[in-house]
Amino acid sequence: MHTKTARSKAASGKQTRNVHKKSIESELKLALSSFWDTFLLKNAKEDGAVASLQNGSGNSSGGSAADGATIEQLQQILGRENVLLDTGSREFYSQDLSFRPHEVAAMVLQPASVDALADAVGVATRAGFAVIPRGGGMSYTSGYSPERERSVLIDMRKLNRVIEINADDMYVIVETGCTWKDLHEALAPHGVRTPYWGPLSGAYATVGGALSQNSLFHGSGTGGTAAQTVIGLKVVLADGNVLTTGSWAHKNSSPFWRHFGPDVTGLFTADTGAMGVKAVAALRLVRTAGHTGYLSYKFDTLEAMLAAQVRIARLGIASECYGFDPYYNAGFENQGITFEEGLSLVGKIARKGGLKGLKNAARVALGGKKILKNVPYSLHMTLDALTEVVAAEHTDLAAEICADEGGTEMANSIPTVFRNAPFGGVRTILLGSQGEIWIPVHGYFPLSRAIPAAQATERFLAERKPLMEKWGIKTSYLTCFSGPEFVIEPSFYWHDQLGEFRLSLIEPEFADKWRDIPADEARRAVALGLRDELRNLFDELGGLHLQIGKYYPYREIMNNEALGNVVAGMKSLVDPDRLMNPGALGL
């Protein structure tokens, strides 16, 4: 079965690649300079970055006329409306969620076709601009924040088509600006999904962003991370050429297999865009489970909860299994699943699950808001299977493990709602219950290190409790697993100015309520310092990281010079001038 859907109309056809001429006659240079002085001042309102373009600062290719010609070429390729030069747009798109220092990009490009993207990248890099891809903006590790002013941000969200759903050969071809929510909904009528099928922020997060950062949550218990889901890529390199990986590159084949020769696909995953701009991805498909069990258990101690979680992970039976600490539980009480929200999901859950759905829906509604009241540690899981018998067996097995480790069953409202409304708003993810800033840090460990890593985290937080109380900083942590790997993600919360980017992601009533929270740079410095300390602790414990970006160490923490040389050599091959997201991966 082959299905093709077009979610956006390409804004422009393939453009002839323009080679930037280094030698321009003086008359043309003066004319272009005069024209762009007038045009840019009118349309960018004396924008500071545009002024730097006009006077040629940092530009080795010849000053205002050269940059004016570059902008004109980009506008011809993309359409004038898809080359953003105003200060507001450039500042908005240049910031992520990290509160780390960054530069403001010189312009933002919004291509709507792969050909236009490739042409634009080639034009930008030939003019000496760094090129940085940006997806839904959910990075908190400076994934796309520029390190230099002479940068071009590529907003990928107009490249959002689901091109082919192949339920015979079990793959989907999708442009990387598509959100995980849109992809999941496109696949649902065909009875298939990707093994990993998105983060909690999947209404905003894009396929390309997750592949670049690497990501886990929905489906990760059995399906692994986002990078493990991809089987082929089309990548725009720094020179504007398009590279195809896996069996997709075979002249007589299709993108059904990743490992056709060396795993070149892997080079472009978890790279934060350092190696190129992922334009189109082929992702593996699996059959959507027809039956799901939901379980929630409370535990008195961290060790008991993690013992159960690790045992369940080793069996490979839970699609998602995540644990909350006491503060996370309390925060969920303040802004989590209310009685009314439970009722609103009753019909949906019942329709999806027949009599079993009615039972689950009733549990959600009756569970109400107080399901986590006075709960020290809680563990929640979904267990999928193709048959009801297997789903029941796996659910019973997980329940036995939780009981054996001292857990007490509680209303399963949280996993039921998370599964049946997987891509809701991001306010409860990005902010605390009272509008606090939320910044996480995480460590990625083998299962045998789960309890020691979590105990070290609790000791760290206990030792710094007086400092955090002094500054009004709160903490929580989430635990989960991706196949046989354990993840602990502590988060820090404090009151600080939210900024326009965060405000744009939450409901208007909350944005209005919290818009005037003042900046608190001193408190912010303490919180970010604690985050850095915890990152360093995880590194000392042997923890790894997703979402490396420009925050987590990569090359600095290697103990193998040969690997470092290979990575640097590959970077030089695909990006000899170091213009693809400079600073990502420490490159």
Image (cartoon, rainbow, N blue to C red):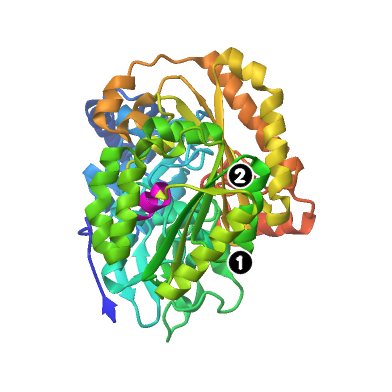
**Taking 522 as reference, is 572 above or below it?**
below
499 left or right, relative to 308: left
Q: Is 416 covered by the magenta stretch?
A: yes
Nearer the observer, disc 1 or disc 2? 1
State the residue at coordinates (35%, 65%).
Answer: 174
* Between 387 and 526, the one nearer to me in the picture: 387
Q: Which residues are magenta?
A: 413-424
Regarding residue 81, the answer to whether it shows in the image is: yes
Badge 2 density bin: few <14, some 14–19, many ≥20, Cα 10 Å: many
Find disc 2 in the rendering and name its residue.
488
- Asked if residue 238 can be seen in this view, the reply is no
Is 72 in the magenta?
Answer: no
Q: Position of residue 70 (x, y in %)?
A: 35, 44
Tag 1 residue: 315
Number of other residues with Cα within 10 Å of mark 1, as a class: few under 14, some 14 to 19, many 20 or more: some
Q: Position of residue 111 (x, y in %)?
A: 31, 52
In terms of secondary structure, where does tag 2 sit? strand
Q: Position of residue 397 (x, y in %)?
A: 56, 65
> Residue at point 39% right, 48% down?
413
Residue type at mark 2: give it.
Ile
User: Viewed as shown, does residue 356 lie left or right of 319?
Assistant: left
